[in-house]
Amino acid sequence: MMRLSGTAAQKANRIRVLVVVAILMLFAAYFGLDLGRDLNLAHLKAAQAAWQAYYAEHPVVAMWGYFLLYVAVTALSLPGAAIMTLAGGAIFGLWGGILLVSFASTIGATLAFLASRHVFRDAVQRRFADRLPAIHAGLAKDGAFYLFALRLVPLIPFFAINLAMGLTPMKTSTFIWVSQVGMFAGTVVYVNAGTQLARVSDVADILSPALLGSFALIGLLPLAARAAVRRIQASGRFRGER
């Protein structure tokens, strides 16, 4: 029994060290390169052609650079994830953007989840003390479906979900796959909007049917998500998954 306890403690310490190293590297890259100044819509539109040209010449470097930056933004709970998602569509197109964003967002969210659980537990506990009872109650009642619903209907900011879930008993593997599935619909909508924003070269282009359709999807997403949540909840799926 003591050996199991010691093994568990050693494993937790290894995870803690790896998470701290990853976070420090991401912080160094993000702030060292002053990447935050570029995470706005105006810069995205201004630099769109240049980034597309760079992607055409150096596809692997462009994809990996974007992927790692997205992971950094989400893992460090920094502002700019929405702009990064639009950029994915603008630079890599619909399917390329969806693929990159879907996995980068899940990896970044998981790093934030692990950092909350193993490194910053006390600080996160104080920060979200008012929300944690409701989150624990939701998990006790609905299991993994509660996280799925939060991902589909973003009543709580995603960065707050990542950090708060780290203080719950939820398994890391469950957090990963539920987040991957739950965030997919929003990823598709925002990446699709990015593909349309990439075509805006004049004010008149804003009224294009394709662009208006993308923003209409963004507006309708919460309504569609609520309907999906009700249907899945009625079917009993996810209940009891922990």
Image: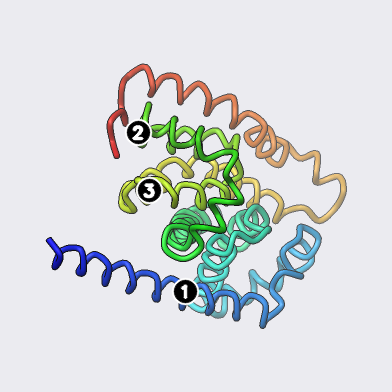
Residue located at (59% from left, 64% from top) = 73
| Mark 1 to mark 3 CA distance (whole Å) | 20 Å
Q: Label 3 belongs to which residue?
A: 175
Task: Give the distance between the C-alpha atoms of the residues marked 3 and 2, in whole angstroms.
Answer: 11 Å
Most foreground residue, 230 or 58: 230
Precedes in sequence: disc 3 or disc 2: 2
The residue identified by callout 2 is 143
Look at mark 1 in the image and give the residue it sits on.
Answer: 20
The answer to which quarter of the image holds residue 72 is bottom right
Q: How is the image coloured?
A: rainbow
What is the three-letter code of the residue carrying label 2?
Gly
Give the residue furthest to the front.
2
* Residue at x 12% of width, y 60% of height: 1
Quarter holding the C terminus? Answer: top left
Closer to the camera: disc 3 or disc 2? 2
Among the 4 quarters of the image, the one containing residue 189: top right
Secondary-structure class at tag 1? helix
